[in-house]
Image: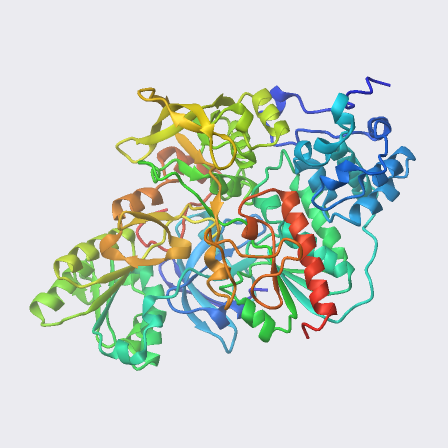
Amino acid sequence: MYQILQARELTNNIYLMDVQAPRIAASCLPGQFVIVRTGEDGERIPLTICDYDAGKGTITIVFQVVGASTYYMKALKAGDSFHDVVGPLGCASDLTKESADELKKKRILFVAGGVGTAPVYPQVKWLKEQGVTADVIMGAKTKDLLILEKEMEAVAGNLYVTTDDGSYGRSGMVTKTIQDLVCSEGKQYDVCIAIGPMIMMKFVCKMTKELNIPTVVSLNPIMVDGTGMCGACRVTVGGKVKFACVDGPEFDGHQVNFDEAMQRQLMYKTQEGRAFLAAQEGDTHHGGCGNCEG
Amino acid sequence: MGDVLKKVPVREQDAKVRAANFEEVCYGYNAEEALEEAQRCIGCRNAQCVKGCPVAIDIPGFIGKVKQNDIEGAYQIISASSALPAVCGRVCPQESQCEGKCIRGIKGEPVSIGKLERFVADWAREAGIKPEGTAEKKGKKVAVIGSGPAGLTCAGDLAKLGYDVTIFEALHEPGGVLVYGIPEFRLPKEAVVQKEIENVKALGVKIETNVIIGKSVTIDQLLSEEGFSAVFIGSGAGLPKFMGIPGENANGVFSANEYLTRSNLMKAFRQDAPTPIMKSSKVAVVGGGNVAMDAARTALRLGAEVHIVYRRSEEELPARVEEVHHAKEEGIIFDLLTNPVEILVDDKGWVKGMTCIRMELGEPDASGRRRPVAVPGSEFTLELDTVIMALGTSPNPLISSTTEGLEVNKWKCIVADEQNGQTSKEGVYAGGDAVTGAATVILAMGAGRAGARGIDEYLSGHGGN
């Protein structure tokens, strides 16, 4: 069950795995996620689906090592198996509900930050399969943290790569590239989909609000079951409480209370909590934020 | 022989000791005690207790066997009606069901039916006795959604009738609320729950974990593509409710479902578990049901001072009498006739307290219970670092929104016939919390049993293929 067919390090501490999960591969759509466990007592770790192949019955996951559970996960090799893989969880991206004709009329911009590139990829690929090209901004702190550039290049319209430190591509945060494209380079967009660290999505939304571009974000709060049962993943969107696992993970970014969402991500990351968890090799990582240091 | 008007007392772990561990509270009867208690049953011909049991166990019948010291015989009588006797003996609200109707209860205490059931089931498990075998195979596949009390009962009954049954479970472990909800100290997981699930499997039932019906595969696909002739939905209660008061999304506010799932399913109560749980010093649990008691007693065992905050009085507490009694013994503080108004949050977003208001009971409301009314100007503050909301659940839309032609009521619960579990969709049956909203283990089992009956009638008749 859930055998790993391929496992490789994409870059420093970011890993990609193809995993056998036929039911998920046959039913998932871009925007959805899975929960995995490495062992009998393992933590339930939510991860976005980076790619899927219904024919082979496999899904592709990408994760960054940020704590004990992902540390153990990276040790898994081709031929090993996950104890559990469940999904697809959450709602599919809204884009998948529109017809190709409608989509073709839209000028779509994706903004991918860090490990957030992984969940952006299947959306851009899916659009390409519908004959729709979308522009993509890919950002990372530094050149070494960029992932899936080649893959993205193959499916994106225009691909703009930027690094915070200017070590590769454009220089600066993704928000600067958005501003440059729209304000100086004559680009216009009808919709933006931003996926990355919570702080990045917050500032992308601030920018796109000013630029009047409707923006969708994909949230990765703390979760336990992922089926709506526990309410750990609740977020405030437009003043209403939503559960990211069943109502999301995608929401209208201009309505999301990011400050609350970021604070809730820190639930198990107090100083005491860190020491406590470190002592027992615990882990508070809940899905590729790309921003925390564990 | 003790006082015949009183139950033979049951041995329990000392309250002070157990408040700091997760071992089972109640030790149950030994053979001598069970024999003595069984003698108290007068074996009514028109037994009222059976009418009080949602799965209609032949109670005088099994107690009669205990009297004869034929415990295996007693077990076979119980297991003809119940797939989970060791569970029910521990978690059923006997006082309002079988024991509530016992003739002995008129002049004294009723026969301790629950403890006798538990004794018989535990004895059979330790002796390695399995429920009696199955009928001839019928060659028809039935899918059961959810491996909680409703699903396990339905699956067990159908397997006994000769159907080829597969249970689909969304979580990584079967058992539903028995595993994620009810704590170890009330219902041991390895020793009791897993063994009862193994008994259901021994009847030929297959369990596929990590399958979310409505996401991984739909009911329509099960019927049209995977060769199932009928489906039983026992998917359970659903999404936790919150109060909608200010501060509820602060760090340190949890649903009871989350808190209990971390501790029970993910074993966060153990020091070495990778899944974290909040280490609290002062906790308020809002609500008065069994789930509230479970969350409170879990927090207590993890080292906190714990308050139950409930807006009505002790008389209206919906929890089992035994749970309230145990909670009090262990040192849980009951703030009754008290309702939260606001959760107070510090500048870093963590809970620092809760403003509450005193309540008094007014006229009876629609539920027949006296309506709690706020006493103006009686607000006060509890200093806390954790608030656990145990207010019940609302239905999960995962299945109803992905199944063509499945009717739900105005509360979004699945509409199903009480007698046979039939829904608005042909071949699809349902029961348990997904139909009734949050209720008890035994009511879900009763519904699972009714669903099995309905499915058997359907597949024995013209329907199905």
Q: Which quarter of the rendering shows the N terminus of chain A?
A: bottom right
Q: Residue at x 51, y 60 (%)?
A: A86
Asked if residue A200 can be seen in this view, the reply is no
> Hey, which quadrant is residue A214 in on the image?
bottom left
Q: Residue furthest left?
A: A184
Vertical placement of residue A50 versus A101, above or below: above
- Taking the image as shown, residue B149 lies to the left or right of residue A222, namely right
Q: Residue furthest right?
A: B68
Asked if residue B82 can be seen in this view, the reply is yes
- Taking the image as shown, residue B122 lies to the left or right of residue A253, namely right
Front-most of residues A163 and B303: B303
- Taking the image as shown, residue B27 lies to the left or right of residue B31, namely left
The location of residue A158, given as percent across then percent down, is: 21, 75
Vertical placement of residue B115 versus A113, above or below: above
Q: Residue at x 33, y 67 (%)?
A: A94
The location of residue B430, given as percent across then percent down, is: 60, 57
